[in-house]
Structures are given as structure tokens and as C-alpha cells.
Image: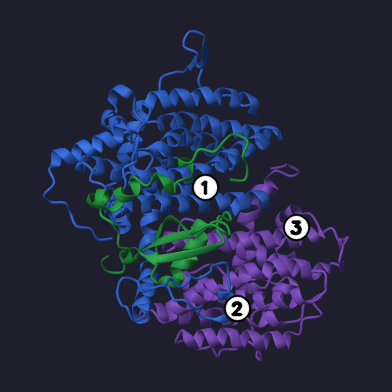
Amino acid sequence: MTGTDWPLWEVFVRSRRGLSHTHAGSLHAPDARMALRNARDLYTRRSEGVSIWVVPSDAITASSPDEKDPFFEPAGDKAYRHPTFYEIPEGVRHL
Amino acid sequence: MTTTAPETVDRAALEAVFDAAVAADERIEPRDWMPDAYRTTLIRQIAQHAHSEIIGMQPEANWITRAPSLRRKAILMAKVQDEAGHGLYLYSAAETLGVGRDELLDKLHAGRQRYSSIFNYPTLTWADVGAIGWLVDGAAITNQVPLCRCSYGPYARAMIRVCKEESFHQRQGYELLLALSRGTEAQHAMAQDAVDRWWWPSLMMFGPPDGESPHSAQSMAWKIKRHSNDELRRRFVDICVPQAESLGLTLPDPDLRWNEETGHYDFGPIDWDEFNEVLRGNGPCNEQRLARRREAHEEGAWVREAAAAYAAKHAPAPGPGGGTPHPTPERGTAASGPTEHPEAMA
Amino acid sequence: MTPATTPTTRASAGPVPVPAALALGDDALVLAHRLGEWAGSAPVLEEEVALANIALDLLGQARTLLSLVGDEDELAYLREERAFRNVQLVERPNGDFAHTIARQLYFSAYQYLLYARLAEGDGPFAPLAAKAVKEVAYHLDHAEHWTLRLGDGTPESHERMRRALDALWRYTDELFRPVEGLDGVDPAALREAWTDRVGGTLRQATLELPTGPASDAWTAGGGRQGVHTEPFGRMLAEMQHLHRSHPGASW
């Protein structure tokens, strides 16, 4: 950012109670309060949310793509973490 | 965001990974490696798209103060507001490619990046607001729906949001024209005149014929673009003809007729000279649109500076980078609005 | 032209007093229109969205209020200038962004405090006020945030904001004159609360409440009696022209 460019913020919106905040996009704002206001106007003007987080984009540390393998592969072979791993006889409900 | 560039990795290997992802219809995400030309093409296209949204506010904003009923006034305000919102979604998609919004706006203001030529036509009557909704937004939707599956993730996601909101735009335009068409004689004439003026420019929105479209082939290969210009244009004509009939309005093309063999409508030749002239800057409103945009930007400079100065003075301890979200509302009443603050994370 | 004066009766509340409905409805309508003039010219894209949100809220309030006492479009489009009952403050031209924010601050603070009182009562405007006060709280928050940033931003923004506050100050007295049909609201108490709220914000913004004539001496302000400022006539001419050009047409 140079001069008077406003910094970039990442916006996370909780669309309904009971769900987690999901990344909705980004926007520019001079400070956190204005970022929240702008996020409310921009990303929830059709009542898409009940709660908003804004995070300065440069405060996010991300895994880098070339780490993809070591970072995520260990989880890749743990199919037993996923419900579809288990075979359930037909007709059994509420599982 | 910060990342360590994988300097040592072989470029050919990266390219292979990229190509495989595109071929498998996977999305490319911001921090994935991508060919420079892919990045450049995307920046150009997304920026042009974003610029079109914000320049596109002008012809319709031209009628907000004159909307003939309060219902129409509310609809039009909401629509023009959406366009600002769409511009924001798209600029934010472009920014994931490493280019700042201010840089893109500077290029727009300097005339170095384009916006859709359609907005260089004037809105002369109230019916033009309807014609823009029905035809211009209709053409835009035809172009944009395939972009929801574009290979670049942030662009595709922005387009999903845009398309969802855009369908209201087209409907309000159609409904507006329908009210005019079924209204008084003068209203009907106003609607017909608007359709006569907007029909051909709308067909031009799909771009030059396939044989003459400079960037098309590569964009199709990269799955930034999914259908050719002519294909989309034909699809649009096929959709519009019966819609015009239901409206009780005619389309200004004597050659327009159903072709049993092709299963599509044939239509007359498009005046590409006009298209090229408008593209070159000689349309009725090119200068006016850009001047108004520049003026708004320049006149807003002191406001943006003030907010930045205030933020710098009142930045919380951690310092630069915009500060951290403050966990407590600044003041009583009004701050207890619809936002909730981040839960403390252990 | 006079509105259709059969006051609508609402289930849980008494008859709607026409002068009050027109006063509140016209305030909202005229300010919505003025804010709508910003479309495409806001200082930053995010602010396009914010200003339009406020305008849309106000337009919604106007439609509800006018519909209580007549046909919204007849009232908006077929009354002459002298029949409008809005305060002069809301009809003042947008000016620069500082003027728009100063106008919003003065008006939103008034509207917020007024609606909060109406919402607590059991009068005919209570249901509308209960909904609108939430919207207006947000408008006030917006105006206060910008007042802080402009007042305590750069020397230029401070000076612009100060000039705007001064220029619009003389239109604030009218906010606290009694309105027929809003008898439950004590204008003096409203003024006191308003002065506290606005004064507090201005102090925080390194600004001061203007000291020019707004209360004792003669000031501008006869909007509630249908006496408006010159720019208002031109605003209405633009707003009404198309509707009036096609008498009886539907849109």
C-alpha cells in the first residue's frame, strides 16, 4: 500500500447461527471499524449474515502451495475420519 | 499475505501441474503457480469487468432522481448500488492476483484499461433503464453465467455472487418495459424507441466475431472463457426473440427469422464499424463517462486522505497494516448494530 | 394539492395524524432523494454502497409513512413545493462530502432520538418507529464515524467539516419546533438530548457545536409550514417531471 490507499481486509461472514464464519471476500477500509461497516453494507445487504469478522489481509499467514504435500497429505489417508468410510445397512436411520 | 517463492522448482514441472489442474476442471487459486500470461489475461479481463460495473452505474444513476414512482426509485437505487457492489467483488478478485485496486483505477482513469463499450451510449428516456435491464444485463448474464465455472477460483466465486444478484436486474428491466408497453401510447412508443436503440449495441457486447477475436483461443484453452463470442451471441438472440414478443415490442432487425435447419434465429449483419468507433473512444458518451469517474475520484481524494490520517492517529498498539479489530464497540447505542465481534480465540 | 385526508386506522394504534405523517414522510423522502444524487460520485466505492443503503432505508420509511395517509406516488409526485412538510435541513443540496455528512449527523441524531421516543409510546407511529429506529441507529453510526474521521483527519478535512457544520447549523432549530400530531414528544427534551449527542461527537472529532443563531434569533426554517429554500423547487422539478408528463400513467 502506498500513500493514502486504504489497507485491504478479509471479510468472514457467519450466514446463520450454528454455522462457522466463511470467507466472503475482501474490501478496503481505513481502519477496523470502517471495515466492519463496509463489510456489513457490502456482504450482507441481502441479509446474508448474522455476524461478521474482518481481518487485515496482511495479518493472515497462509500455508504455501509447495508445502501442500507434507501439510495436507497425512490427513489424506485417514478416510476413517469421514462418515462415508462406514458402510451402513440400508434402512438404518438417524446415523 | 506472505509466502516463500519456490525458486528452485522446475518451471516445466509447475506448468505441468497447472495444465493438469485446468484440464481436470480444478480451480486455480491465488497462491498457486500460474503462467504469467494467464495472470495478465485474468487481470485485464477482471479489471475490465470491474470497471464496467462502476462506469455502468452512470447511465442508470442518470434516472434515479427522475424515476416516475417511488417503487421504481427504490428498485433503481438498489440496482445501481448492486453495481458498485459487483465492482467491489471484482476488484477484490483482481487483487488476489497481486494488483492493487488503486493501480487498476489509475489505469482506468488514464484510459489504459477498458470498460464495456455499451456504457458509452446515453440513457435518453426512462425506458432506457428498462432496456438496459432487459438487454444489457441479459447479455451480461449470458456472458457471465459460464464465468461462474472459470478456472480461476476467486473470479468464479465473484461471478457466482454477481450472477445471483444480476437476475433481479434483468427481471426489473423486463417488468419496467412491460409496464410501458402495456401503458399509454406514449409509454409504448418510449419502450419501442429504447429497444430500437439498445438492441444492436447489446449484440456487440459479445465482442467481435470468432474469427477476429484476438484473445479468445487462449482464454478458451485456459478455461477462463467457456464459449465463443458468436455462440453466446446466438444464444442471446434465441432467448430474446420470444421475450420481445411477450413484451409486445419488435426488435429492429428485418432479417431476424427462425431457421428450421440450424434450430436458431438468423439475424442481420452487425455494424462493426460502429463498434470499433465506440471502442476507439468516439461513442456518444466516452468522454463524459470517464470525466465523471475521474472527477469523483479526484474530489474524493481529501476524504480518503482524511480517513487514512485518522486511522494512522488512532491505530491500536500493534501498529501499521491497518490495526486489529477492536473487541469492544466504540460507543453505546449505534454500535450495538448487526455485527458481532470476534470470539476470543485461545 | 392536498392529500387524501382519510386517516388510515391501524390495528393497535390510534388514527394517524396527517401533518405528522407528512412531516416525517417528507423528511425521509427528500433526504433519500438527495442521497440518491450521490450515486456514481461517492469519494470511494465502499461509500457508494453505504450511502445507497441509507437512502434505501429512508425511502422505505417515506413510502410507509406516506401510504398511511394517501397514495405514496400522488403525494410524492403531484404535490407542489408549498405542500411539502419536510424540514429545510434535508432539502439542502449535497455540497461536498463534509456537507452531506454534517447534514446526516444533524438529521440522523434528530431522527434517531425522535423515533426512539415514538417507539416507546403507544401512538400511531410506534410500529413504524420501532422498525425505523434500528435503521436510523445505523445511519447515525455512519455519520458519527465519518464526523470523527473528517474532523480529526487532515487539516483540510477538519476545515471542510467545520464549514459544513456552520453552514447547516441554522437549519437545525426547526427540528425542535412542535409538530402537530407528535404531541407525546417534548421538543425541549429532544433538543437537549440531541445537543448532548451531537456535541459529544463533535468534541471527540476535535470540532465544536457551532455558535451561530439556531435557537433564539430568527433562523431559517419554515419547512414544516411549506416554506422551503430555493434549491428545493428545482429538486422537485427534476423528481416530478416524468411522472407529471404522463398524467394518469402507470409505471
The residue tagged 1 is: B60
Q: Are marks 3 and 1 on the same chain?
A: no
Q: Quadrant of residue B304?
A: bottom left
Q: Amino acid at mark 2?
A: Thr
Query: Residue at position x 47%, y 67% from top?
Result: A36
Other-residue count near label 1 (Cα within 10 Å), few / some / many at <14 / 14–19 / ≥20: many
Q: Amino acid at mark 1?
A: Glu
Gap between marks 2 and 1 measured at Cα: 36 Å
Q: Are marks 2 and 1 on the same chain?
A: yes
Q: Amino acid at mark 3?
A: Leu
The residue tagged 3 is: C75
Q: Is B289 drawn above or below residue B197 in the view shown? A: below
Q: Which chain is purple?
A: C
Other-residue count near label 2 (Cα within 10 Å), few / some / many at <14 / 14–19 / ≥20: few
Q: Which element is circle 3 on?
A: helix
What colour scheme was applied to this rendering of the protein? Answer: by chain
Query: Residue at position x 53%, y 63% from top?
Result: A51
Pick whichever, A3 or C76, lies toward us: A3
Q: Which chain is blue?
A: B
Gap between marks 3 and 2 measured at Cα: 34 Å
Q: Is residue C127 left or right of residue C192?
A: right
Gap between marks 3 and 1 measured at Cα: 24 Å
